[in-house]
Amino acid sequence: MWEALEQTAWVKTLGETGWMYVVVSVIHYLTMFWFIGSMAVVDLRVMGIAARKRNLAELSGQLYPWAWTGLALAIISGFLMFATDAGDWAPDSIFHVKLGMLGLSIVFAIVIRVWAPKWSAEPEIPMWAKVVAALALLCWIGTILSASEIPALEGLG
C-alpha cells in the first residue's frame, strides 16, 4: 500500500525534484517550530514562567489561531515528505514515536485551550493546570527529539 503511494506520479515528481522537496522540508520544519513555539509560550504562561502580565485567555486566544495554522501546514508538508518514502517510514518505530508524541501534545494543547478562559477568571492558576502545561512542554520536547532522529535514520545526520 505505502509503495503504491510512493509510485504515484506527483509523489515521484516531488521526490525526484530536489528544489521541490527542499521547499516542502523547509516549510515543514518552519511550521513545526511556529506551531510548537506558539503552544510553548502558552504553556509557559500557564506555568507562570513567561508573559506573567498577560491575561492567559487573551494570550491563548491570540496565539492558538496561528498555532493551528502552523499545525495544518506542518501536517500537509509532513505528509508530502512522508509520501516520497512511505514504504520505509510507515513501519519505522521512531517515526511512530514522533507521531504519538505529536498526537499527545495536540491533546494537551486542546485541553489547555479549552480551560484557559476558566483559569484566567480564577485568582490563581490551579496547580493541576501547571502540571498539564509542564507535561505538554515535555511532550513537545519529546516530539522534537524524536523528529531529530529521523534525519539520522535517513542518512542525513
Image: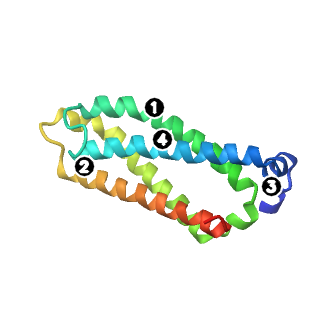
Mark 1–mark 4 contact, CB under 8 Å?
no
Task: Report the amino acid beneath label 2.
Answer: Ala
Q: CA distance from mark 1 to mark 4?
A: 11 Å
Query: Which color scheme is applied?
Result: rainbow
Quick one: SS at disc 1? helix
Where, by quadrant of the figure, is residue 141 drawn? bottom left
Quick one: SS at disc 3? helix
Q: Which mark is residue 81?
A: none
Mark 4 Cα-neighbour bin, 10 Å: few <14, some 14–19, many ≥20: some
Q: CA distance from mark 4 to mark 2?
A: 23 Å
Task: Say which residue label 4 marks.
Answer: 34
Task: Say which residue label 2 marks.
Answer: 129
Question: Residue drawn at (59%, 39%), measured in percent from left and top?
Answer: 73
Q: CA distance from mark 2 to mark 1?
A: 21 Å
Direction from residue 80 to residue 6 in the image, left or right: right
Figure label count: 4
Question: Residue drawn at (45%, 31%), measured in percent from left and top?
Answer: 65
Mark 3–mark 1 contact, CB under 8 Å?
no
Q: Give the answer, above or below, for where 83 lies relative to 88.
A: above
Q: CA distance from mark 3 to mark 1?
A: 31 Å
Task: Report the amino acid beneath label 1.
Answer: Pro
Task: Report the amino acid beneath label 4.
Answer: Trp
Of marks 4 and 2, which one's residue comes earlier in the chain? 4
Task: Say which residue label 1 marks.
Answer: 65
Q: Which mark is residue 5?
A: 3
Position in image of residue 43 (x %, y %): 31, 46
Position in image of residue 51 (x %, y %): 24, 37
Of marks 3 and 1, which one's residue comes earlier in the chain? 3
